[in-house]
Amino acid sequence: MKRDCDTAIKPQRESLASRYAGRTVVAIGAHPDDLEIGIGGTLAKLQKAGAHVVMVVASVPKDFEIRMAEARLGAKILGCELRLLIDDGPRRIEDLKTCDLVGLLDGVINDYQPAVLLTHSSADFHNDHLLIYNACLPTQRLAHFDFFSYHPTNCRPVPIAFHPKAYVDVTDTIDAKMHAITAHKSQFGGRGLDTEMYREFAHVQGRMMCGWCWLSRKTPPFAWSLANEVDQPGRLSRNRHFGWWRG
Ligand SMILES: [Zn+2]
């Protein structure tokens, strides 16, 4: 009979920061603001730890100049490089054939040779986000890199089933994330929408989960997982069902 300590999930020994320090991180979002909302704290954290972080915005559906200026400001606040995937003016992702979209994403992988790719998930409710997620999947044939999907992104609270297996402690970078989100004035302040729900969401996650954790100590070549950001983890007792670390 196995004891609890034999089957319990142990903390990851390698920190998130050290895993990608000195390497290239590519994050892909369908639109300007998706990356800031989904993983802004994580990107700032990785950049601070020495990673070269590239924020890839797939398309700008309208108000091209305004939204590009906001995207540039958001990336600057997070300390990241910005790349626009479909760069010939206002375009919708569904205007492209799937093979053309995959071809553009292949170009990103070939150009940057990332150690990890972060993008939308299959749990998303926005068709553009799903198109990007599905087009990112085949890029894994080109090289070995970690692959993470972040929480569905939206400008308003939407209940959706998302079951992450990894969590990132962004206590030190949550303010940068919030600042970067508010850079997208046309989507929030300009429409009278509040952004504080993102801090509150991360904080609730932090109270529940205590930090960055994995379901396995062994990280395969493709560390396939879903990730959530948490703020101020560990205020309550450790979650007994997960190993954890403070990346
Ligand atoms: Zn979006």
Image (tube, rainbow, N blue to C red):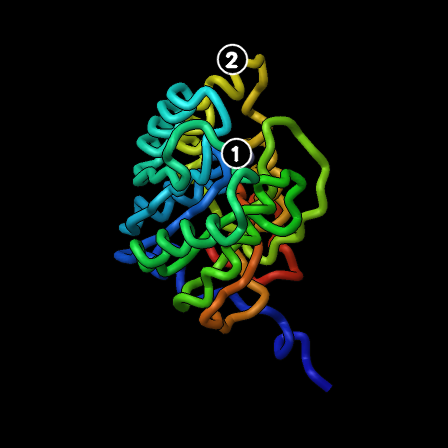
- The answer to which of marks 2 and 1 sits earlier in the sequence is 1
Element assignment for label 2:
helix
Q: Is residue 219 above or below residue 35?
A: below
Camera-near label (2 vs 1) is 1
- Residue 10: % across, % down: 54, 69
Ligand 1 position by quadrant: top right
Residue 233 seen from this side? no
Quickly name the residue at label 1.
92
- Residue 184: % across, % down: 45, 23
For the image, the number of numbered tags is 2
Q: Residue at x 42, y 23 (%)?
A: 64
Element assignment for label 1:
loop
Q: Which one is in front, 180 or 139? A: 139
* Mark 1, other Cα within 10 Å: few <14 / some 14–19 / many ≥20: some
Q: Residue at x 35, y 34 (%)?
A: 75
Quickly name the residue at label 2.
190
- Residue 151: % across, % down: 59, 44
